[in-house]
Image (cartoon, rainbow, N blue to C red):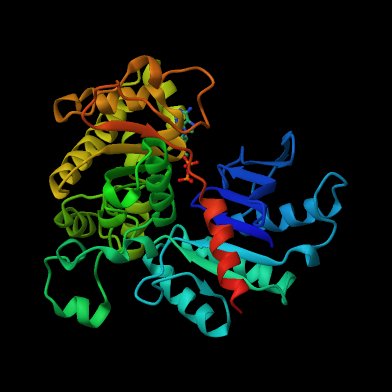
Amino acid sequence: MLVLVVNAGSSSLKSQLIQTDGKISLMRCLAEKVGAADARMSISYAPEFHKATYGVAGLSVAECLAKLLDIICDDPESPISGLDQIEAIGNRIVAGGEYFTKTALIDDASWENLLRCEELAPLHNPAADECIAMTRRLLPNTPQAAVFDTAFHQTMPPKAYMYPIPYRYYEDYAIRRYGAHGTSHRYAAQQAANLLGRPLRDLGLITCHLGNGGSITAVNHGKSIDTTMGFTPLEGLMMGTRSGSIDPAIITYIMRRDGIDYDEMERILNCDSGIKGIAGGSSDMRDVLQQAAAGDERANLAIDMYVYRIQKAIGSYYAAMTRTDAVVMTAGIGENSADLRERIFAGLAHMGMILDKERNRVEGAIGMNRIISIDDSPIRICVVTTDEEMRIARETDNLVSMM
Ligand code: ADP
């Protein structure tokens, strides 16, 4: 089945055309820094994947997708010449709330529920929904699936997913921890099990998805038992523009002091905080690492805080599990930044997570799943390339094939 996968991020669009029969990717697209003046979109085709780059300044994530569809229908090198050749569309959705516990077909009923979930992930769900609305218009007869980041975390026990606030908020408003990045954590855990040559059900893993957004999950015997993101993807780690966990009293204090409303406060916590809030400029880790290297104190502080909060989360999940066999690093920062991995694990050796500095920095290793701890490290450290798109394509195929 030829599946178009649409993965709309907060400031990015990742899309692939995947032939699920052979698990082959035929087209890859990545739009980065969407919304910024220097936003770019690269498109490449199998087998060589030579990238052509397009400027997409001023376009929204959905408009980038529309541009991508135009380009791949016209480009003689593209594997398709018309949208009717796409057999199904798989959409990554960050938050499924209480409405979705597994991958769902998108029809009028589920569409209503998708819209209701937008407030749970205000940076992500609206962008994904705009993409779905657009592709439903352009390809009205093509089946579409929604693959949820929250589904993998449905195995968390109540002691992990409940918040210590009056119980009626759970009963009346379904306020509980849902987690996010589930597709990535599940895939990273499976890849780590393959690397370690042991069945996933025998392992205790701490999976770290570190991108613009970030979350860490305790994966015990293949199941998520706890994760840092909560009711929304705002909780947990410090992120590119999101605060992560802070004292909740700060929020009401600032609102009172500055006289700002709920929407403005939410925007500050989601868009102006995290790395950007501390370093004062870019939220992109590559930029902030450069600023820090040039001696910028605030950039250095942002990185110190970012690293420290990751170390504390890894430590807390070591305590939450009955065994820890490996820590798994994935996503933009986890896969690509040897510097940050070195800083994170420099503080964790006493827990038995001992990085091999040379293996961590092997040239040309980017994009390769590998173990980067020393041979006799009690807990292994793995780097795996996240392939959310392949998983989404396969889940979409499974669901659509059952129709
Ligand atoms: P998203 O959460 O939007 O899917 P990604 O997983 O693509 O994001 O991660 C994006 C982040 O990864 C950005 O902060 C980017 O700066 C960072 N990143 C990518 N490559 C590197 C690198 N070589 N060194 C440090 N950070 C990197």
- Extreme right residue here? 76
Quadrant in the picture for the N terminus? bottom right
What residue is drawn where x is 53% and y is 32%? 367
- Extreme bottom residue here? 109
With 72 as the anchor, is 183 left or right in this view? left
- Extreme front residue here? 198
Does any portion of residue 130 appear in the rendered image? Answer: no
What residue is drawn where x is 38% and y is 65%? 151
Task: Please name whichever residue, 232 or 145, is drawn nearer the observer in this view of the structure.
Answer: 145
Does any portion of residue 129 appear in the rendered image? Answer: yes
Task: Please name whichever residue, 284 or 258, is drawn nearer the observer in this view of the structure.
Answer: 284
Task: Please name whichever residue, 372 or 199, is drawn nearer the observer in this view of the structure.
Answer: 199
142 shown above or below 93: below
402 shown above or below 18: below
Image x and y of residue 188, in percent: 41, 45
Quadrant in the picture for the C terminus? bottom right
What residue is drawn where x is 29% and y is 37%? 327
With 311 as the anchor, is 335 left or right in this view? right
Image x and y of residue 28, in percent: 67, 45
Image x and y of residue 369, in percent: 46, 33
Image x and y of residue 256, in percent: 19, 59
The quarter of the picture where residue 145 lies is bottom right
The quarter of the picture where residue 231 lies is bottom left
